[in-house]
Image (tube, rainbow, N blue to C red):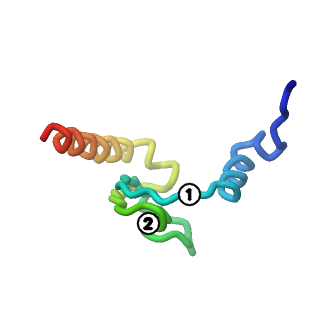
Amino acid sequence: MSLSLPPELGTLKGSQGFAAIEYVATPYAGSITVFRSQIRPPNELWSYQLGWDRVVSKVDVHDVPGDHLSIYSGDNIGTLAAKLTACLEGVRAKSAT
């Protein structure tokens, strides 16, 4: 038996919209790290923690130069990589003690 996907899942925009409507986050007692673009959409409705503060005990936010897409290119990717590396090294150091 073959199941077909709803048509809205056939495109990136459609699947993102579907996920935004259908996904229900559950509380998480741990902490997460969010890499947030510094250039934000006008009239953005999200909190500084991009909504994660509603379900997570501790949200560490790291601002990265650029917008949602440009944080992954040019000089911005180096900044993102450096921040990610520092976070990973911090976790390694904590787990070693």
Give whichever of discs 2 and 1 has the lower sequence position.
1
- Please name the residue shown 76% across and 43% down the image: 9
Q: Is residue 71 above or below residue 42?
A: above
- Please name the residue shown 50% across and 65% down the image: 51
In this rendering, the label closer to the viewer, 2 or 1: 1
- Residue indicated by mark 1: 25
Farthest residue in the left direction? 97
- Residue indicated by mark 2: 53
Which of the pair 12/25 is nearer the observer?
25
Position of 44 compared to 95: left or right? right
Q: CA distance from mark 2 to mark 1?
A: 11 Å
Position of 16 compared to 42: left or right? right
Q: Amino acid at mark 2?
A: Asp
- Please name the residue shown 69% across and 44% down the image: 12
Q: Amino acid at mark 1?
A: Ala
Residue 70: x %, y % from top left: 48, 49
Q: Which mark is residue 71?
A: none
Q: Badge 2: how crowded within 10 Å, few (<14), some, or many (20+)?
A: some
Quarter of the image where the C terminus is located: top left
Among the 4 quarters of the image, the one containing residue 84: top left
Residue 1: x %, y % from top left: 87, 24
SS class of the residue under badge 2?
Answer: helix
Residue 86: x %, y % from top left: 24, 44
Looking at the image, can residue 39 be seen? no
Q: Is residue 76 above or below residue 2?
A: below
Looking at the image, can residue 3 be seen? yes
Which of the pair 62/90 is nearer the observer?
90
